[in-house]
Amino acid sequence: MLAYVILLCMAILGVAAVLTLIRLVVGPEMPNRVLALDTLYINALALIVLFGIWLASDLFFEAALLIAVMGFVSTVAVGKHLLHGEIID
C-alpha cells in the first residue's frame, strides 16, 4: 500500500514541478522567477526524499540535505542581489 502512495505522491510532485517550471519561464517579473526557482528546488527535494523512501536508501537523504543547503544559500544570494545589486559587500 505504501508503494502506491509514494508513487502517487511522486506523480503529484512531478506535476507541481512542471507547473513551477512554467512559472519560472513565463514569470512576469524577476521576484516571481526567484520564487518559482525556490519552489522548484523544494519540489525536487521532496521528490528525492520520496525516492529514497521508496528504495529504502540513505544516500538520497544526504543528497537532499546538500540540495536544501545549496538552495537556501542561492535563494539568499539572489534575493540580496535583487535588493542591493551586489552579493558581497
Image (cartoon, rainbow, N blue to C red):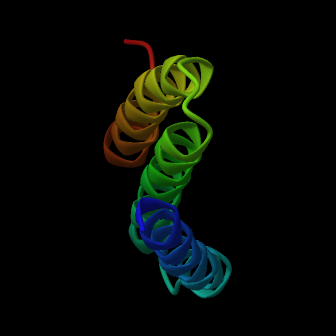
Relative depth, front residue between 26 and 19: 19
Residue located at (50% from left, 77% from top): 8
| Relative vertical location of residue 15 with respect to residue 87 in this rendering, above or below | below
* Residue 31 position by quadrant: bottom left
Could you tell me residue 37's position as x and y percent? 52, 58
Relative depth, front residue between 86 and 32: 32
Question: Looking at the rendering, in which quadrant would you find the C terminus?
Answer: top left
| Relative vertical location of residue 69 with respect to residue 53 in this rendering, above or below | above
Residue located at (52% from left, 20% from top): 66
Question: Looking at the rendering, in which quadrant would you find the N terminus?
Answer: bottom left
* Residue 60 position by quadrant: top right
Apparent side of residue 38 relative to residue 58 in the rendered image (left or right):
left
Residue located at (48% from left, 25% from top): 61
Could you tell me residue 65's position as x and y percent? 44, 22
Could you tell me residue 72's position as x and y percent? 38, 32
Apparent side of residue 52 relative to residue 77 in the rendered image (left or right):
right
Could you tell me residue 27's position as x and y percent? 54, 83
Residue at the farthest front position = 1
